[in-house]
Image (cartoon, helix red, strand yellow):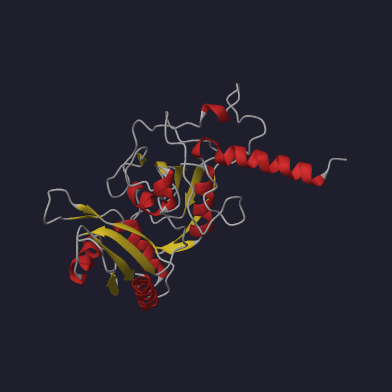
Amino acid sequence: MDNWDDRRGSRDRRYNSRYNNGGMSNGGQRGLPGASGGLAGAGPFMGGNGGPPPSTMSGMGGPAPGLPQQGAVLMVYSLNKDRMNSDKLFNLLCLYGNVVRVKFLKTKEGCAMVQMGDALAVERAIGNLNNTVFFGSKMQLGYSKQAFLADVVQPYDLPDSTPSFKDYMGNKNNRFINPEQASKNRIQPPSKILHFFNTPPNISENAMRDVFMEEDVTPPKGMKLFQSKTDRSSSGLLEFNDISEALEALVCCNHARIPNPNSRFPFVMKLCFSSSRNLQTKMDRMEKNDEDEDKMD
C-alpha cells in the first residue's frame, strides 16, 4: 500500500505544476496552495485564437489525460435583458479575472456565456456573484462544458442595439494581465461601498453624481475622497443604499469616461467593491494609518 505522504506529495506536485507553471497562479483562493490575503492570480490564457492552449489538448481534440475537465467558460443566467449587455457584464466580471469573450444567447433571453482567462477566474466569479440581485433580476452563475467560445461572425443586436458578442482579448481594462497588475486586486464580494480610482483630481460630489445619473442608475448617497500624494488623479469611496444599487452602479459606470480639463484624453474611472461597511470606518482606519506613518517618520 502506498505511503500517504508520498501520494499527497505527488498530488501537490501535479497541482503546482498546473497552476504555477507558465505564470499561472491559484488566484488567491481560500484553501488553495499559495493563497495570500485575497490577492488575485495572474497568467490567464489570453493569446491565440481564443481556444485552449495546445498543451492542454490531446491529439483527438479533447482534454489531455490527467487534467481536470472544468474549463474557463462561465454560464450566466437570469440577467435583465433590457439593462445588460456585453460591456456591462465585462465591467462586473473583470473584478474576478480577465474577460476574454462575452456571448449572449439568442435562444435564451437574459443568458450569456463568458470565456474568462482561466478556470480559477470562473471559480472566483461564481463564489462571489452567484444569486446576486440587480436590475430586479437574480443572476445565477454556473460552469459551462465548453472549453472556449468561438468567434461569432455576425452577432445579433441586443435590445440596446449593441452586439451580442464581443471580444475583450487584450482589452486594457482587464486587471489581471500580468503578475504586477494582478497583485493589486483584492477579491471582494459585492458590498454597498464602492472604491473608485483614476478620476479627476478633487472631483466634486456633484460631478460624481452626474456620472451615475447619465447612465440612469441611482447615484451614491455619500462620497469620501482619499488624501492623495499626487495631483494627477483622485480616489475614494462611494456609499449606496444597498448592494443592489452598488451592483447596478458598478456594471454601468465602471470604466466610465470623465472629461480631463488638462488633456484631450479623458479619465477612465475604475470601480471595485470595498471591504468597508460604511464610509467612516474606512476613513478612520486610513487616518490612523497616516498617523502611524507620521510617528515612524
Residue 234 higher or lower than 277, as above or below: above
> In the drawing, does residue 63 fall left or right of residue 242?
right
Q: Nearer the viewer, residue 92 or 161?
A: 92
Looking at the image, how many numbered discs can be counted on the residues? 0
The quadrant of the picture occupied by the N terminus is top right
In terms of image quadrants, where is residue 288?
bottom left
Q: Look at the image and tell me whether residue 135 can be seen.
A: no
> In the drawing, does residue 30 fall left or right of residue 271?
right
Q: Residue at x 67, y 34 (%)?
A: 66
Residue 49 higher or lower than 101, as above or below: above
Q: Residue at x 49, y 35 (%)?
A: 148
In terms of image quadrants, where is residue 224?
bottom left
- Residue 132's spot in the image, x, y percent? 47, 62
Residue 117 higher or lower than 221, as above or below: above
Q: Residue furthest front?
A: 297
Q: Residue at x 42, y 71 (%)?
A: 276
